[in-house]
Image (tube, helix red, strand yellow):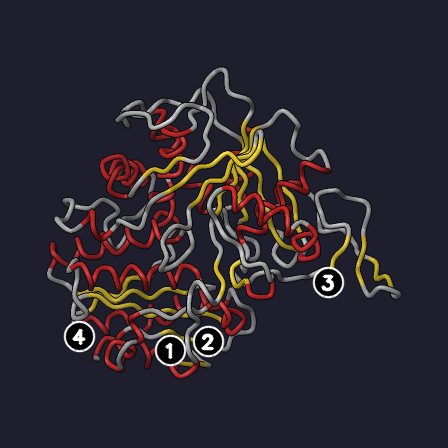
């Protein structure tokens, strides 16, 4: 496969990464499958490449732009139907589901707990499956379960167009104590309803929260880098910076590097493994605190200004509106099980982390907008319109870390631009198109109704 660019990038694009790297990602699926203790419900590797695959995946372009010396933006948000990096994994998952349907004759009903973006991207992928003929509404459906805290993130799509589609593909808002409890609720409901659903409707329920569902697709990030900005012996030290909840994307990138090191991908083998730099918010800072081996510092309330301040640790905001501030409900996972694996990679290959506050994001907002614009990404001038903050958080985190010498001056930084949208870019979901549940029994009824619709 030809290299598309030399090491200096002024704005390059790898079109349709799922189609372009199909065979490499199949190899990534085999590599992931070899390390599992149990096979997944839906096989990680597809039997064949469907005839409509190129059209189905045509929204998976990835861009890479150098926006200033030693700063690059990796644009993973180019699907207008989702505006987040979850597009790549979601389309691959739906393609796998369609492959399972063709191979077994079973129908598939996805159940996905989400803080917003995973569910939105999967629903968009289901729409694309219907539109391209990869699967029909009679064969493939999805139940999306989100916490009330994520209500502002829920987006409209063609699955709400008419009542039958809405019933078969419901968006559920769950009344849970903590946002992450949607995972516990959803897994309980899948366990309780899977057998009855299959016996009465022929729908196999697929619970989607499996790291490999995302890790395999996110391996494409390393393949893009190998084409556009390969790591050579002459390259400066490099960090990959990401606003993370559980760091699935970086673990996928790590799998992609392993694939490149197998020397069977047809792409340049990197001279070394770049480091990882984690960016989080105060309410869910567990990846950073685990990595650094420290707790969030004590903040002191400034009675005059109403702000909270600390000056002990440069890895944490000096000023915040609240010590448990939530900038974005997307980043809702506490104590993610991926901490140990990510810490091990950073211990071996370098990196670090920083926690940012909304005030820091707003202080850097003009600069962040300018840098994003240089990469062809338009951020709304009014920050109150933003519904997905990961892009702003990631760039802010890198700028802050540079100022505080948390990132060495001679280091190249590749920022994973994993999500940004406003209500103008993605229309919000209307209240009348939501289903609300308070108990597992409520959710079981919604799942069974979706399967019978």
Whichever of callouts 4 and 2 sits on the residue coming sooner in the sequence is: 2
Confirm or deny contact between disc 3 and disc 4 (CB under 8 A). Answer: no
Of the pair 133 and 244, the residue shown nearer to us? 133
Confirm or deny contact between disc 1 and disc 3 (CB under 8 A). Answer: no
Q: Which residue is mark 1?
A: 443
Which quarter of the image is occupied by the C terminus? bottom left
Residue 352 vertical placement versus 305 (above, below): above
The Cα atoms of the two marked residues, 2 and 1, are separated by 8 Å
Q: Which residue is mark 3?
A: 322
Confirm or deny contact between disc 1 and disc 4 (CB under 8 A). Answer: no
User: Quadrant location of residue 266?
Assistant: top left
Confirm or deny contact between disc 2 and disc 1 (CB under 8 A). Answer: yes
Q: Secondary structure at mark 4?
A: helix
The Cα atoms of the two marked residues, 3 and 2, are separated by 26 Å
Q: Position of residue 104 (x, y in %)?
A: 12, 57
Q: Nearer the viewer, mark 3 or mark 2?
A: 3
Q: Nearer the viewer, mark 1 or mark 3?
A: 3
Whichever of callouts 3 and 2 sits on the residue coming sooner in the sequence is: 2
Q: Which residue is mark 2?
A: 174
The disc at residue 396 is: none
> Label 1 neighbourhood size at 10 Å, few (<14), some (14-19), many (20+)?
many
Judge left or right: residue 384 versus residue 210. right
Whichever of callouts 1 and 3 sits on the residue coming sooner in the sequence is: 3
Confirm whether residue 344 shows in the render. no
Of the pair 80 and 247, the residue shown nearer to us? 80
User: Quadrant location of residue 26?
Assistant: top left
Whichever of callouts 2 and 1 sits on the residue coming sooner in the sequence is: 2
Which quarter of the image is occupied by the N terminus? top left
Of the pair 29 and 171, the residue shown nearer to us? 171
Q: Residue at x 46, y 81 (%)?
A: 438
The disc at residue 201 is: 4
Q: Residue at x 15, y 60 (%)?
A: 133
């Amino acid at each position: 496969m030809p290299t598309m660019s030399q090491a200096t990038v002024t704005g390059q694009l790898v079109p349709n990464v799922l189609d372009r790297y199909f065979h490499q990602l199949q190899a990534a699926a085999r590599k992931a499958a070899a390390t599992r203790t149990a096979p997944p419900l839906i096989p990680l590797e597809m039997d064949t490449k469907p005839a409509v695959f190129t059209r189905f995946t045509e929204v998976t372009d990835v861009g890479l732009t150098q926006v200033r010396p030693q700063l690059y933006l990796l644009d993973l948000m180019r699907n207008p139907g989702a505006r987040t990096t979850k597009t790549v994994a979601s389309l691959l998952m739906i393609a796998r589901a369609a492959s399972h349907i063709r191979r077994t004759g079973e129908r598939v009903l996805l159940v996905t707990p989400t803080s917003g973006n995973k569910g939105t991207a999967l629903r968009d992928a289901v729409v694309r499956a219907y539109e391209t003929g990869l699967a029909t509404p009679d064969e493939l459906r999805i139940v999306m379960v989100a916490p009330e805290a994520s209500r502002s993130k829920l987006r409209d799509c063609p699955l709400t167009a008419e009542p039958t589609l809405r019933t078969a593909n419901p968006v559920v808002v769950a009344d849970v104590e903590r946002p992450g409890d949607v995972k516990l609720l959803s897994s309980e409901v899948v366990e309780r309803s899977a057998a009855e659903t299959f016996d009465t409707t022929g729908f196999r329920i697929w619970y989607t929260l499996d790291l490999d569902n995302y890790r395999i697709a996110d391996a494409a990030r390393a393949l893009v880098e190998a084409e556009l900005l390969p790591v050579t012996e002459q390259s400066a030290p490099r960090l990959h910076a990401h606003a993370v909840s559980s760091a699935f994307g970086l673990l996928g990138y790590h799998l992609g590097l392993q694939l490149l090191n197998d020397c069977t991908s047809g792409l340049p083998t990197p001279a070394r493994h770049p480091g990882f730099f984690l960016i989080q918010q105060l309410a869910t800072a567990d990846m950073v605190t685990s990595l650094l081996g420290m707790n969030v510092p004590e903040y002191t309330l400034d009675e005059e200004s109403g702000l909270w301040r600390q000056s002990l640790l440069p890895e944490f905001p000096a000023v915040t509106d609240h010590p448990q501030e939530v900038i974005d409900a997307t980043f809702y996972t506490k104590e993610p099980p991926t901490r140990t694996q990510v810490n091990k990679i950073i211990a071996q290959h370098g990196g670090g982390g920083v926690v940012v506050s909304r005030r820091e994001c707003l202080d850097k907002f003009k600069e962040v907008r300018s840098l994003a614009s240089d990469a062809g990404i338009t951020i709304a001038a009014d920050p109150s319109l933003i519904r997905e903050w990961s892009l702003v958080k990631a760039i802010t985190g890198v700028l802050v870390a540079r100022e505080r010498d948390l990132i060495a001056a001679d280091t190249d930084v590749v920022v994973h631009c994993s999500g940004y949208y406003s209500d103008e870019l993605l229309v919000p979901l209307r209240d009348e198109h939501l289903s609300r549940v308070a108990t597992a029994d409520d959710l079981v009824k919604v799942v069974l109704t979706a399967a019978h619709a």
